[in-house]
Amino acid sequence: MANTRRSRDASKAKIEIETYPDYQIIRQPNPLQGAMKRVSEQGHDDPVARAEQALSDLSGEFEGWMQEECNRLAQAHAAIIKQGLNAETQAELFRAAHDIKGDAATFGYPIAAAAAESLCRILEHAPDVAKVPGDLIAHHVNAIQAIVREHRRFGVDSVAGELSRKLRGVADEFLAAVNKDRPDHLEVILAPSIIPAE
Amino acid sequence: MFGIDFNKLRFLICDDNAHMRRILRTLLHSFGAREAYEAEDGATALEMYIHYVPDILIIDWSMPIFDGLELTQMIRQPNGNGNPYTPIIMLTGHSDKRRVMMARDAGVTEFLAKPISAKALYQRIINVVVSPRPFIKTKNYFGPDRRRNTTNTYIGPERRQGGKAEVIQQQALLDKVKASS
């Protein structure tokens, strides 16, 4: 059905290849042109507003989801305490922290996301993760859990923000020290994001 | 003024996190999309990509089996089984310059850093639908043109040798896919 429609549309599109000595430029008529439509500038349809409303409708789930992410982080940390830091336990802790870094702000916990980012940086940029102090990892895991747990308490955001900034400062000091003989790597670590916010 | 008829687009979402997949599905459906398939690892995504022939892929970087970067490299094979020109939007928590460059050099079309917003996702989809870039094939790269800006003020070395082009017409790629399936 839909596959047939695609092939039929595509059959009209011919690819043009410009060949140069060391590269080719390949052009084809826009294969997604069929999905473009003219809309009135006075139209009231706003897909972004609709999507934001849908996300808002979904937000009742976010607290539970955030708790699940925290439980996963705690389990990954418990596995490290029990089995030690190896490739598998490290990868699971990184994935759990990385997911919180990516999801938490969407769920309404941006400070937890910042603390999780700090933990990700340690796990990603320490030249020998086995030598990362256990306390440094534990403080991050505990902080993320506390930030999420106490999220609803009035005035907690300023304390949580300060905690997150302190953790990031300690993590950056640690990374600067352990990477002092790798200036190129240090530059990569300290470089700001180049992704536009929107 | 142009808009997008989302119900004419087929999406493939690939993210190992079920919550993020739910958010993406919610956003795409509220934009108007009806067809949004989901995979939770790179291997499943590759199978679904060949089977469902999506118009747009939205993929995470960190995934089990093989990650989003490897998935992109597998898709960007000029003689592969699927459509190597499919737009790929990489949605990831990685946002440092080194990662962005790696994604670009693997053939990612658009890069979107988490946390996700409806506006940012919509804008990336608009970009790939309304302003597709030509593809470049070199000895070691196949993917969308990495030169987004055509500026006359560039003063670095010219890495493309240029010269007179030989222009040839080819059968549309999706026809080839159809013929080979």
Image (cartoon, grey):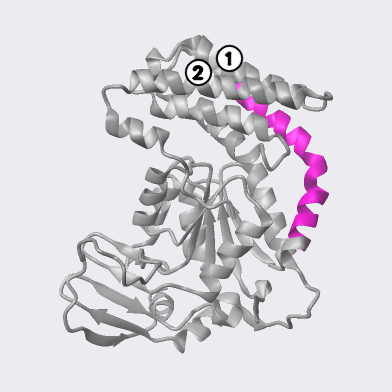
Q: Are marks 2 and 1 in contact (CB under 8 Å)?
A: yes
Quarter of the picture containing the C terminus of chain A is bottom right
On screen, residue A19 versus residue A45, left or right, reads left
Any part of residue A78 in sight: no
Q: Secondary structure at mark 1?
A: helix
The image shows residue B140 at horizontal and vertical percentages of 23, 59
Give the mark, 2 or 1, whose residue is nearer the N terminus.
1
Q: Residue at x 50, y 29 (%)?
A: A120
Residue with the mark numbered 2: A170
Nearer to me, A34 or B145 = B145
The chain identifier of the residue carrying mark 2 reads: A
Q: Residue at x 42, y 15 (%)?
A: A132
Q: Residue at x 63, y 49 (%)?
A: B116
Q: Is residue A55 magenta?
A: yes
The chain identifier of the residue carrying mark 1 reads: A
Give the residue furthest to the front.
B153
Separation of residues labelled 2 and 1 (CA atoms): 11 Å
Q: From what the image shows, is residue B5 above or below residue A95?
A: below
Nearer to me, A54 or A80 = A54
Q: Is residue A91 magenta?
A: no
The image shows residue B177 at horizontal and vertical percentages of 41, 74
The amino acid sitting under disc 2 is: Val
The image shows residue B106 at horizontal and vertical percentages of 36, 55
The image shows residue B129 at horizontal and vertical percentages of 54, 73
Q: From what the image shows, is residue B43 above or below residue B144?
A: above
Quarter of the picture containing the N terminus of chain A is bottom right
Q: Which mark is residue A190?
A: none
Residue with the mark numbered 1: A139
The amino acid sitting under disc 1 is: His
Q: Secondary structure at mark 2?
A: helix
Structural crowding at the residue carrying mark 1, measured as other residues with C-alpha within 10 Å and reported as few (<14), some (14–19) or many (≥20):
some
